[in-house]
Amino acid sequence: MKKTIIPLMLLIAGVTCPAPAQTGSLLKLSGRITDVKHDTLTAYVTDLVARANTYQAAIPLAPDGTFSVSIPATEVTQLTVMEKLNQEEMRTTPIARYFVLPLIPGEEARVEGTLDNLTFSGTAFYKDYDSIAKMNQQTEKEMSELYAKLADPALPAADKAALQQAGMQARTARAMSYIRQHPDREAAVFLVSVLNGDSLRTAINLFTPEVRNGRMRPLWQGVVTMNEKLTATEAASKTMKEGIPAPDFTLKDVNGNDFALSSLRGKYVVLDFWGSWCGWCIKGFPEMKKAYAKHKDKVEFVGVACQDTEAKWKAAVAKHALPWTNVFNSRTDNVDVTYALKAFPTKVVISPEGIIVKIVVGESADFYTYLDKLLD
């Protein structure tokens, strides 16, 4: 079974939006990276509140690794630049190499070095950010070594838990120490991305009012909102299980009309939680269409798009000619939290009485075998 998991600070949705015309809303990014396997990088702009990417663009590299690109930005958020892999590499590589940086409208950033050891320069903000980037690179190296140890099947579970906790505590302590020493630096706000819970709330209050309430405010507010959603999702996962009543919700369909789950009471329902960015979700559509055509007299399918943009969602519904009801879980809706979604696709089967009878995470042929037995 395959499933797509969305980490906290690495959202790689394939969402493309046009660049705005105003030059003041662009980040000019240039540099030279010498160890990229191919001739292309990919840039993703992340909406931290929606946990989705709002922009994707290819960054072509010259033979010597140099590049120059302008990235659209209307407010401070996160930019992820990732090495582009071919299909064979995507099957064998756990995750592509990447780097992240704050996306500041109207600024200029330059990066030089290798993907594992980059130097940042440009305007004053990015010169200041360089020390934070180097600290993050060291943290990433330590976390990679930690995960290698955790992968050892001979390591007792208690030792794994202790190692993981120690690694997280070390990362938190390093970020908090830097923030305490530099509460007046805008670039230090980016460190809240590795914090959560009490440490996150404490860190935000350490910054001077000028930094906390200045242009970096959308960045830390996005991290706070995302953490709140993740915490709520974890809490919901303790009660979200087969045998409970399916939580009702009302979302907009592709025509802008309200759709309520409760309107389908009396029929079997399959909720398909997906996103236009989710490769395994898209790959599953042909089998879903076959199942829908076979059973549509006995069951209603409802696609619930999550961590997406409305434009990309509608385009995907049209492109793949999805024949069932499709609704959109926007950045202000919380259906993904209510249903404790941690991976995509996730399918939830609901009985005519409104009871959850099956939850299937990932794309698997077993789901359709189950559906055949249930409905035939």
Image (cartoon, rainbow, N blue to C red):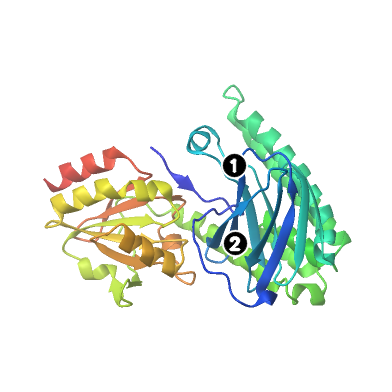
Q: Secondary structure at mark 1?
A: loop
Q: Position of residue 262 (x, y in %)?
A: 25, 69
Q: Label for residue 45?
A: 2
> Furthest-front residue in view?
63
- Label 2, label 1: how far apart the Cα atoms are: 17 Å
What residue did someone put label 1 on? 96
Q: Pick the residue in front: 18 or 297.
A: 18
For the N terminus, give its image quadrant.
Answer: top left
Q: Residues within 10 Å of mark 2 (few under 14, many from 20)?
A: many
Residue at x 80%, y 69% (from the top left corner): 207
State if disc 1 and disc 2 touch (CB < 8 Å).
Answer: no
For residue 255, say whether it is visible: yes
Amino acid tagged 1: Ala
Residue placed furthest toward the right: 181
The correct choice, above or below, for 22 with respect to 220 in the image is: below
Q: Is residue 81 left or right of residue 280?
A: right
- Quarter of the image for residue 156 reads top right
The answer to whether residue 12 is left or right of residue 143 is: left
Q: Position of residue 94 (x, y in %)?
A: 55, 37
Residue 205 x/y as whole percent: 77, 69
Quadrant in the rendering for residue 266: bottom left
Task: Describe the element under mark 2 as helix, strand or loop.
Answer: strand
Disc 2 or 1, which lies upstream in sequence?
Answer: 2
Q: Amino acid at mark 2?
A: Val
